[in-house]
Every structure is written in C-alpha cells, then in structure tokens.
C-alpha cells in the first residue's frame, strides 16, 4: 500500500523531537514491508531564522525536503494569520500542501490513501485535500484535538465535517472515541488503537549501575514532555516543597522554560530541579528513576471525560508490556492505587498538587 502521511506533527532537522510519535508509527508501518510512504509535514512560514524569534525562528531553519526513516519528507510553508489563525489554518494548510502533493502526483508518485494525524487543523486540511485529489482518508485523533478544540463551535463543526469525509478514524484510547461519539461522530468508523511501547528501546537495566552513571542519588522523579502549560510540569515543581529530599528531572523543551525555572527559584527548590532539555528517546533511561510523574493526568481532569478509562488503558498497556503473573498483579495494584488517589488531583493548578503528591 502506498500512503501519504499528512501532519504538522512530524520531526524535522531543526526540531528532531517534534511529533516523534508520528515518525515512530510510520517507521513501524514501513517495517511490515507492506507499506511505501511519502510524508507531507507543513511548517508555519516565518521570514527569519534568527534565534530571537524563538520557536518560529527554529522552524524557519527546517529544510524544504529531507529524508527521515528512509522516506522523503516535504515541508511546505503555510501562513498563520494573527487573530483569525485558528479558523483559517486548515485552509492555509490545504493550500500549501496542495501544490506539493500535486507535484508529487505529476512526478508519478501516486498514493492509495491519506493518513492524517491530529484532527484539527491537520485532519480538516486533509479532508479538503482528499476531496480535491479524490483520495480516501484516515484521520487519527490524538488528544487535545478532541478534548479541547471540540469545545469551540466552529472548529467542532469542521472536525465533524472532516470525520464525515474520512473512510475511517482512529483514536489512541476509548475515552477519545466516546467523546467523538458524544459529539455526533459515527462510532462505527472509529477504531481505538492504543499507543504501543518499544520494548527494544525501553527495557529493564542494571538500576544501581545506571543511577551511578547518571549521578542520581536518593528518590528521583522524572517529568517528560513539551514545556507548556498543558503538560503540567508546574504541578510537579509545586509539589517539591512538600517532598523534602526528592529530586526532579524534567526532560523537554518549550516556551515555558523560563517560567518553570522561575517557579523553582520562587519555591526554593531550584537546587533539586534539573532541566535536561530535549533528549532523544534512547537517552531516557527510565529504569534509573524512582518514579515517573505524569502531571498531565491531573491537569487534564477537566477535559478527559473518563479518567478511569484512561487509567484502565495504562493498566492494560503495563500488562501487555511486561509478561508474567507477578507483573500483572503489580499492574492491577498500580491501577487501583492510582484510582484511590484520583480524589487528590484537583486539576485546579499548582496549589492542589502537594495534597495529591502525599497520597
């Protein structure tokens, strides 16, 4: 099968960790030997690549075409219009990609299906492109595209329209599928495919030796994710005053770096917080940690329709990832312990975090 992967969430030479999950999915698709692919991953247009312009300057330095995981990746530029950008972006995306896709077809690179990731604006743009090129479409819902963006009436109508154009839709958990159905989307065409775990990359190691290698001593937390408010790193930092002696490592980059550093200084815990920056997955040696913090669960209580369903999915993934009766027992116990602690997660900001942390 020949697929055209379409998404703004895909790594590039300037931001090699951006949307790495989409690249990982494609890599495993290619490994089956049954898929050939091209990738169209649009990037916002910006006139300068100078570092003073932050994220936009970094993206400006991305190449127009590159090869990743053995596949040609095209980065057409699309316009982001201030004030009205949220509602104009699907059309801007479609216009910029249409020229690139048209050129690929003219050069003989036909494809059987558009594989779009993230419903808005990417999925809506992909639906426009599917109609224009008369190609079937599959759209994957990843999280905030449904839990957050569907709250806006106009965006919700566009998402529902895109879903009607799609031959099939994919969600990463049942909670997202249920939310889409609640908003009137056809559940018969929505399939839940949970994110997997690369057991070659993430595997047990000699914990004592690894902790010594990385200079870790004592109880250590790890929080991983883009440094923006949705990821909830501030919740973990705010919990540290109530957790004496606990050290926190934060892996990720993003616009909130200075804000989080200031928070750590204000709370008097800066000496126990280390910002690792963006890291390749093979350097995240998780077996060295005492505990991995997932602050996004607490931050998302107001937007995830069923926290229990989310935690059940985590429990299921743990059971599948680690074989054996003992591991299954541990996974089930972890699930029930987490459910018992959900009442301590207020989702109301950093002020509620210490109480949750002590549960």
Image (spheres, rainbow, N blue to C red):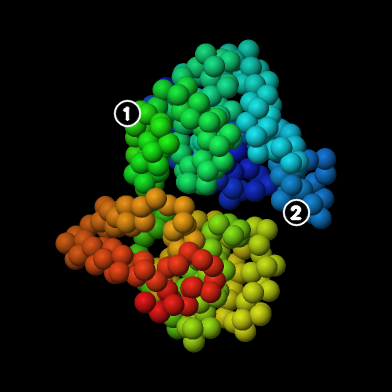
Circle 2 sits in a helix, a strand or a loop, which is it? helix
Pick the quarter of the image with the C terminus.
bottom left
- Relative to 274, residue 176 above or below: above
Evaluate whether residue 201 shows in this view: yes
Q: CA distance from mark 2 to mark 1?
A: 43 Å
Residue 111 spot, x, y in % from top left:
50, 19
At x 71% / y 32%, what residue is drawn? 78
Circle 1 sits in a helix, a strand or a loop, which is it? helix
Question: Would you name the residue on which mark 1 appears?
Answer: 188
Left or right: 1 as drawn, with respect to 7: left
Q: Quadrant of residue 80?
A: top right
Question: Would you name the residue on which mark 2 appears?
Answer: 54
At x 34% / y 32%, what residue is drawn? 187
In the picture as drawn, the residue positioned furthest to the bottom comes out as 244
Pick the quarter of the image with the N terminus.
top left
In the picture as drawn, the residue positioned furthest to the front comes out as 153
In the picture as drawn, the residue positioned furthest to the left comes out as 325
At x 70% / y 67%, what residue is drawn? 258
Residue 22's label in the rendered image is none
Residue 307 spot, x, y in % from top left:
36, 56
Evaluate whether residue 39 shows in this view: no
Residue 328 spot, x, y in % from top left:
21, 61
Q: Specify which label sits upstream in the sequence, 2 or 1.
A: 2
At x 82% / y 50%, what residue is drawn? 50
Q: Nearer the viewer, residue 8 or 207?
A: 8
Q: Nearer the viewer, residue 272 or 24?
A: 272
Q: Nearer the viewer, residue 91 or 247?
A: 91
Q: Nearer the viewer, mark 2 or mark 1?
A: 1
Left or right: 271 as drawn, with respect to 112: right
């Amino acid at each position: 099968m020949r697929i055209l992967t379409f998404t703004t969430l895909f790594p590039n030479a300037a931001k090699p960790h951006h949307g790495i999950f989409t690249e990982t999915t494609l890599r495993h698709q290619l490994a089956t030997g049954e898929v050939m692919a091209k990738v169209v991953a649009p990037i916002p247009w910006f006139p300068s690549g100078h570092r003073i312009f932050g994220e936009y300057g970094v993206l400006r330095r991305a190449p127009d075409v590159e090869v990743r995981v053995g596949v040609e990746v095209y980065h057409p530029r699309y316009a982001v219009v201030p004030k009205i950008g949220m509602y104009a972006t699907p059309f801007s995306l479609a216009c910029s990609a249409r020229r690139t896709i048209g050129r690929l077809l003219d050069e003989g690179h036909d494809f059987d299906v558009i594989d779009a990731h993230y419903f808005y604006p990417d999925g809506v743009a992909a639906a426009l492109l599917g109609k224009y090129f008369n190609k079937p479409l599959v759209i994957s819902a990843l999280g905030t595209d449904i839990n957050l963006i569907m709250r806006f009436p106009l965006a919700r109508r566009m998402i529902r329209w895109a879903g009607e154009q799609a031959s099939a839709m994919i969600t990463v958990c049942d909670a997202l599928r249920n939310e889409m159905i609640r908003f009137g989307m056809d559940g018969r065409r929505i399939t839940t495919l949970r994110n997997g775990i690369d057991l070659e990359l993430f595997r047990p190691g000699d914990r004592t030796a690894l902790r010594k290698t990385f200079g870790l001593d004592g109880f250590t937390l790890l929080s991983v994710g883009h440094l923006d408010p949705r990821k909830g790193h501030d919740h973990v930092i705010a919990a540290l005053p109530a957790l004496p002696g606990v050290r926190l490592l934060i892996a990720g980059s993003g616009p909130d770096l200075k804000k989080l550093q200031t928070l750590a200084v204000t709370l008097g815990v800066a000496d126990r917080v280390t910002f690792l920056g963006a890291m390749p997955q093979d350097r995240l040696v998780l077996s060295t940690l005492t505990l991995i913090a997932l602050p996004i669960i607490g931050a998302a209580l107001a937007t995830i329709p069923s926290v229990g369903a989310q935690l059940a999915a985590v429990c299921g993934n743990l059971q599948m990832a680690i074989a054996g009766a003992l591991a299954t027992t541990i996974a089930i116990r972890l699930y029930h312990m987490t459910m018992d602690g959900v009442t301590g997660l207020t989702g109301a900001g950093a002020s509620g975090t210490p109480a949750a942390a002590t549960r």
